[in-house]
Each structure stands twice: as C-alpha cells, then as structure tokens.
Amino acid sequence: QVHLVESGGGLVQPGGSLRLSCAASGSIFIISTMGWYRQAPGKQRELVARITYGGSTHYADSVKGRFTISRDNAKNTVYLQLNSLKPEDTAVYYCNLYYNEHSDYWGQGTQVVVSS
C-alpha cells in the first residue's frame, strides 16, 4: 500500500510562487511515474505535470514555463514549483503515483488559491 501526503498549498497573490511537496511511502516510488493534477470548482481534474522514474517531464500547455516538476528519489518526494501564479491556477492540487493499473494512488489534495 502506498500513501501520498501533499503539502505546501495556500493563499498567494497573482504573480507569486508556491512549492508543493508530495511525500510517498513504499518502495515503488523510484520506479513510478509521479504526477500533479488539479481540479478547480466545477471543472474536471486535469493533468498539470508528470515526471517519469527516469526524469522525463511533461507539462500542460497552460503551465509551461511557469511550473516545474522535480523528484528526489532518496526522499521519496516529488515537488511542484509554481511561479508567476494566476487566478486561474486556483484549484485543489493532487499528487498521483502510477506504476501500473493496479498501482495507481492519489493523495488527499492541497488547496492553492491565487487572489489579491
């Protein structure tokens, strides 16, 4: 069983920055793809960024150049650096660990609010 615990959300002004963290239990972290998703009120959950066990990254067009995903395999932790935040980035951000269809886990989410 894998447990994911996100932290780092909060209230920030437009143009500000936050760093989200997701700590994972279990030994499959280092061989898994880690992703950050978000869900705004009334909208579907969407992929923000993901990083493979080899370090390859993928970003949603809406966050390219502003957000950076990274991972520390020694700490079983994945990070999402959010820069140049916009009000439309307001959402609950979820961490995901995917190894295969039987090993697909979600965290509880952390709220990000971008508002002046």
Image (cartoon, rainbow, N blue to C red):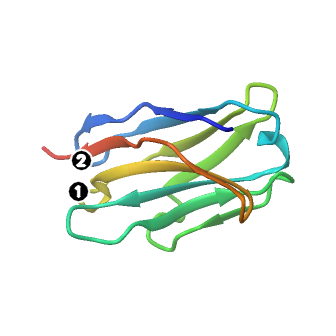
Foreground: 17 or 30?
A: 30
Q: Residues within 10 Å of mark 2 (few under 14, many from 20)?
A: many
Foreground: 75 or 115?
A: 75
Please tell me which residue is depicted at 59% across the width and 39% down the height of the picture.
79
Sequence order check, earlier mark of 1 and 2: 1
Q: Quadrant of residue 17?
A: top left
Q: Is residue 56 shown left or right of residue 110?
A: right
Numbered tag placed on residue 114 in the rendering = 2
Q: Residue furthest left?
A: 116
Please tell me which residue is depicted at 36% across the width and 35% down the height of the picture.
9
Q: Quadrant of residue 88?
A: bottom left
Q: CA distance from mark 1 to mark 2?
A: 5 Å
Q: Position of residue 14 (x, y in %)?
A: 24, 48
Foreground: 103 or 56?
A: 103
Residue at disc 1, secondary structure: helix
Numbered tag placed on residue 87 in the rendering = 1
Q: Is residue 61 above or below residue 68?
A: below
Q: Is residue 59 above or below residue 24?
A: below
Going by the numbered disc 1, the residue's amino acid type is Pro
Please tell me which residue is depicted at 40% across the width and 58% down the height of the picture.
38
Please tell me which residue is depicted at 27% across the width and 61% down the height of the picture.
40
Image quadrant containing the C terminus: top left
Q: Position of residue 21 (x, y in %)?
A: 54, 34
Foreground: 85 or 32?
A: 32
Going by the numbered disc 2, the residue's amino acid type is Val
Callout 1–callout 2 Cβ contact below 8 Å: yes
Q: Is residue 78 above or below residue 68?
A: above
